[in-house]
Amino acid sequence: MFTTVRTLFLLLVAVSFTAWGQKTVVFASSASAGSEAKAVIAPEGFDLLKLEKNESLDTLCERDHLCEAIFMKVNRMDRRHIAAGRTVLLPVDTEKASEYVPVPQQLPDNRGEREVRVYLDKQYFGAYENGALLFWGPVSSGTRSHPTWPGEFVVNYKQRHKRSIKYNNAPMPYSINYDGPYFIHQQSLPGHPASHGCVRLLESDARRLFGWIRTGDPVTVL
């Protein structure tokens, strides 16, 4: 009789290519008996890359501004949060990478002429006109201790220059209030949920959304 020894933190990585030109990396951890392998798929136009020490967006994208914009959107992080050891999607073909869309492009149940949908599981948002996707971007929503609550809301008001009353006068540019103390606004994006319940955006997305959305428009958080 043989005893199976499961080693904690063992990481098995298998790389394969699909018929669609996608690269799949399968991570299998044996930290627990019930653990399952998780696959991370690189969409067409991207490579999976583990960041090395001292790498920056400038070096990764060789100062290609389109590459930089795609990198921040897809990886849900700003320039300040590019850190060694993280595995990211690096655009290697910007034309193909630009076609990547991680949110639904059509809404069968849209709530109005203009609607913002926040996808908490994916950490992206979509801006929709008559149910058709107009633009999308990354978000950083609330942590487990300060969650962003799902639900159907509307835009109550907008405030271009706002600061937090509760959290050390922190800046909240391009603020869009949709539910009591909760706002959609520009702030840092570390690549994971990190806010006190608000929905953080990149500066470019926050500025565009602020100019596009109107008071009374629906906001749906899923």
Image: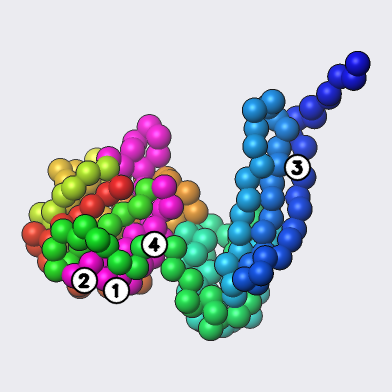
Residue linked to disc 3 = 11
Mark 3 touches mark 4? (CB < 8 Å): no
Question: Mark number for residue 134?
Answer: 1
Mark 2 touches mark 3? (CB < 8 Å): no
User: Label 1 amino acid?
Assistant: Leu
Q: Is residue 130 magenta?
A: yes
Q: Percent from the top left, x then y, of residue 115?
A: 20, 62
- Quadrant for the N terminus, please: top right
Residue linked to disc 4 = 103
In the drawing, does residue 73 fall left or right of residue 93?
Answer: left
Residue linked to disc 2 = 129
Q: Is residue 216 above or below residue 92?
A: above
Report the residue at 34% width, 36% height from top: 146
In the drawing, does residue 184 fall left or right of residue 72?
Answer: left
User: Label 3 amino acid?
Assistant: Leu
Q: Percent from the top left, x then y, of residue 133?
A: 30, 70
Does label 1 or label 4 sit earlier along the sequence?
Answer: 4
